[in-house]
């Protein structure tokens, strides 16, 4: 029997499911600590967050903590895997193309990490919140499973990761707007949702290639998150892209039509 606890942290709904009821209080504490550690280093709203030192370096190498380094590596990996669709750099540049930039616009490919030293060119400003939350989901699930020797599913927002031994019948995870899907142990799922667009004219049809929601199942939460976010903006090419990545995916367009990869309904394919 699975025991569940829900609360809110870092502007997100948090949930933990464990296969051993006695482990629930400690699991909660471990997950809360993991979230707090990540939030402390990369929450841009916190004046004492370590990420500000990185953003203020502006072309100067800066030494960071091990956690900050790990988060930056996850963010840069997600950017490479999605061809830059999931970008760790904030867009702080003017949309007025008549004003030429003083410096070349930096990209994630210009960022260098050597151990715990990070170098980003002038003009680079990191915002890695989404990837950091996904990374924390993976980390928290692994910590709970290792320390408490139980099965666990951890959710932060729309990102879920599993670790340890699965409950009888497997992990039955609800998909937003749909029925449950089974996750085999050690896999993760993320759902990306589109921002609502302005109303269309009555006689104008919404483009069918615009996705309202994309859910992806992958081997870890960072990849599930990155792939769902990338697919969301790829239009009709997203279907072929997720299949090429051998991912289980469910895509819903703005008209409510559902598309799934062949492997979506089979957990053994994850």
Image (tube, helix red, strand yellow):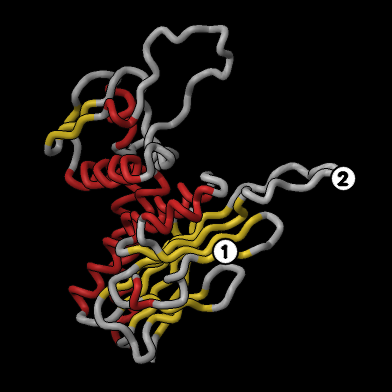
On residue 203, which mark appears? Answer: 2
Count neighbours of disc 2 (C-alpha within 10 A) and say few if under 14, some if 14 to 19, many if 20 or more.
few
SS class of the residue under badge 1? strand
Number of marks in picture: 2
Q: Indicate whether 26 appears above or below 221.
A: below
Q: Indicate whether 15 appears above or below 235.
A: below
Residue displayed at 32% across by 36% down = 51
Residue 161 percent across, percent down from the top left: 35, 67
On residue 259, which mark appears? Answer: 1
CB atoms of marks 2 and 1 within 8 Å? no
SS class of the residue under badge 2? loop
Q: Indicate whether 56 appears above or below 173.
A: above
Specify which label sits upstream in the sequence, 2 or 1. 2
Q: Quadrant of the C terminus?
A: bottom left
Image-based side of 72 in relation to 128, left or right: left
On residue 120, which mark appears? Answer: none
Residue 138 percent across, percent down from the top left: 30, 62
In the displayed orientation, state which residue is furthest to the left. Answer: 115
Residue 28 percent across, percent down from the top left: 34, 72
Residue 161 in view: yes
Residue displayed at 43% across by 56% down = 242
């Amino acid at each position: 029997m699975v025991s569940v606890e829900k609360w809110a942290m870092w502007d997100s709904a948090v949930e933990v499911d464990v296969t051993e009821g006695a482990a629930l209080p400690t699991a909660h504490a471990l997950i809360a600590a993991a979230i707090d550690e990540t939030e402390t280093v990369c929450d841009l709203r916190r004046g004492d967050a370590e990420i500000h030192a990185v953003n203020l370096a502006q072309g100067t190498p800066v030494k960071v903590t091990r956690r900050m380094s790990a988060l930056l590596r996850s963010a840069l990996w997600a950017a490479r895997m999605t061809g830059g669709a999931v970008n760790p750099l904030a867009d702080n540049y003017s949309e007025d193309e008549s004003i030429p930039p003083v410096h070349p616009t930096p990209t994630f490919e210009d960022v260098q990490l050597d151990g715990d030293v990070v170098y980003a060119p002038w003009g680079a400003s990191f915002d890695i919140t989404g990837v950091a939350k996904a990374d924390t989901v993976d980390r928290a699930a692994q910590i709970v499973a290792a320390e408490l020797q139980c099965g666990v599913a951890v959710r932060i927002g729309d990102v879920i990761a599993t670790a340890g031994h699965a409950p009888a019948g497997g992990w039955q995870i609800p998909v937003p707007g749909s029925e449950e899907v089974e996750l085999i142990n050690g896999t993760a799922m993320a759902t990306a949702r589109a921002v609502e667009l302005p109303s269309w004219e009555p006689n104008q049809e919404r483009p069918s290639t615009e996705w309202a929601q994309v859910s992806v199942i992958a081997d870890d939460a960072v990849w599930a998150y990155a792939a769902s976010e990338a697919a969301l903006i790829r239009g009709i090419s997203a279907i072929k892209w997720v299949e090429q990545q051998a991912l289980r995916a469910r895509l819903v367009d703005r008209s409510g039509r559902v598309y799934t990869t062949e492997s979506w309904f089979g957990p053994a394919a994850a």
